[in-house]
Image (cartoon, rainbow, N blue to C red):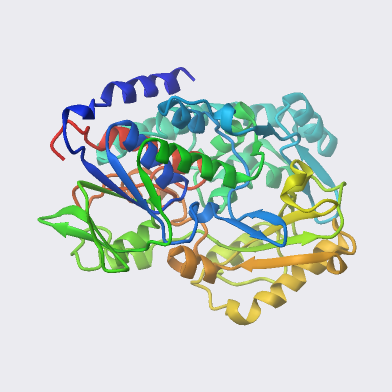
Amino acid sequence: MVKCLAMLTVAAKRRVDTTRTSRPPHAVVIGSGFGGLAAAIRLGARGYRVNVFEKLDAPGGRAYVHRQDGFTFDAGPTIVTAPFLFEELWQMCGRNLADDIELRPMSPFYRIRFDDGETFEYSGDPDAMRAEVMRLSPADGVGYDRFMQDAAAIFKVGFEQLGDVPFTSWKDMARVIPEMVKLGSYRTTYGLVAKHFKDPRLRVVFSFHPLLIGGNPFSVTSIYALINHLEQRWGVTFAMGGTGRLVQGLVDLIEGQGNTVRCGTEVRKITVTNGAATGVELASGEHVAADIVVSNADSAWTYRHLLADHPRRRWTNRRIERGHYSNGLFVWYFGTRRQYPDVRHHTIMLGPRYRELLNDIFKKHKLADDFSLYLHRPTATDPSLAPAGCDAFYVLSPVPNLKGDFDWSKGAERYRQAIARHLSDTVLPGLEDEIVTSRVATPQDFQDRLLSFRGAGFGLEPILSQSAWFRPHNRSEEIDRLYLVGAGTHPGAGLPGVLSSARILDTVVPDVAAKV
């Protein structure tokens, strides 16, 4: 928290009294996901005039909100694990997050259900966690303590020290390599977990976290064990009213700064003059001049399409094509006429295979017959998200991205029915007769609606060769005055990642007093 206050002090010092000038510099932000909205607030706090352009009819990007038949469905993120990053944004606007948003702690964080019906209650209570570990495997109690010590050490470096470093130079990467080697970051996340746990079920319980940001636990570096500690440090909370309340709260902050969010306004391209971004051209043909441009669009989409007319040295179409992308997501949103009080707010339902299923998804790009699921029942905490006596759900299945050859236009309903049968046979008895509203999103929707390359749910996969300096930089390597935020840039996906990417702008974007 000391570092958070220091960051706010630095940001405050960098703000400029724009009343001295007749026209503060103008920033255009492309996309209104959490990264774009946070970027707009930070730029506004430093004296920029800001316009956010959003393709969809409402803000949020992947955090869009679907409302139908009296039900409210958050389209994407469902939990908050680093609330101080939101608190910073409210403080920058002279307000308190708690006055506008109630973040309710989850206990347990998740119920993990194995394929045989055995469960594990994953919480923020170290004693309860140790008891759960020893209930499944008495010999792994010591391993739990050692793993959490390792996760804390990794968090201290990977999140506290490097989460808001811009990595604009390879020297930034070189400086941290010795520390990362010392922490064993050459291991995969699963490899680190397997070092401490013998029971195969516990190896799954403590290694699945990279999937929350689009990474294969068997491929990504063990630095992502920091998520295990991050959850313990600040807990897992839910925004009452749904994650969309946070989106609307950020929009309100932007408008309170005198800036704007324009929805239903797609950016066709970024305009460039003499190697520097000069504004954007909208799909309507309108040209909007800007002193700087911030893209919260998918990084591959930004370079392939928004800069299609500009020659690129590093992020060429060939390099983008050859990149490794995160998994796709199949998400089914549904409401039931009855309630299921025995189902937790968050349930992770593991299938019969772990490594093999992930290999099908990430390596073979093959849609398997089996699946593992994340079941979200927000009405367990906030009944207002459904009509009285009803429940709102979304169930998410990690699937291959569009590099695979599965035709979702023909197979989505069949896949949904398979998931419905499985839920009906396990945790939601009689489900198929209780559904009153339903909608699905597939990797094809992520590509067509959210402009995500290959329909990847989280952009580039966070393997070591696509992390930190190797990831598209927050200050574009290709175009001056162009900046990137969101899942496709450093530090990566997830709410803490995309909010931290906006935080980096405080370091790389010039002050309004500087020549921009």
Q: Residue furthest bottom?
A: 410
In this rendering, the count of numbered labels is 0
Q: Position of residue 280 (x, y in %)?
A: 25, 58
> In the image, is residue 138 above or below residue 498?
above
The answer to whether 514 appears left or right of 384 in the picture is: left
Of the 4 image quadrants, the one containing the C terminus is top left
The one of 398 and 365 positioned closer to us in this rendering: 398
Can residue 345 be seen at all in this image of the molecule? Answer: no
Can residue 408 be seen at all in this image of the molecule? Answer: yes
> In the image, is residue 226 above or below residue 393?
above
The answer to whether 205 appears left or right of 495 in the picture is: right
Q: Position of residue 489 (x, y in %)?
A: 38, 49
The one of 341 and 424 positioned closer to us in this rendering: 341
Specify the quadrant of the image occupied by residue 330.
bottom right
Q: Residue furthest right?
A: 430
Specify the quadrant of the image occupied by residue 354.
bottom right
Q: Position of residue 164 (x, y in %)?
A: 38, 34
Residue drawn where x is 45% and y is 43% of the image: 498
Residue drawn where x is 50% and y is 56% of the image: 58
Q: Position of residue 209 (x, y in %)?
A: 61, 45
Residue drawn where x is 82% and y is 54% of the image: 390
Residue drawn where x is 70% and y is 30% of the image: 124
Q: Residue furthest top?
A: 2
The answer to whether 515 appears left or right of 5 in the picture is: left
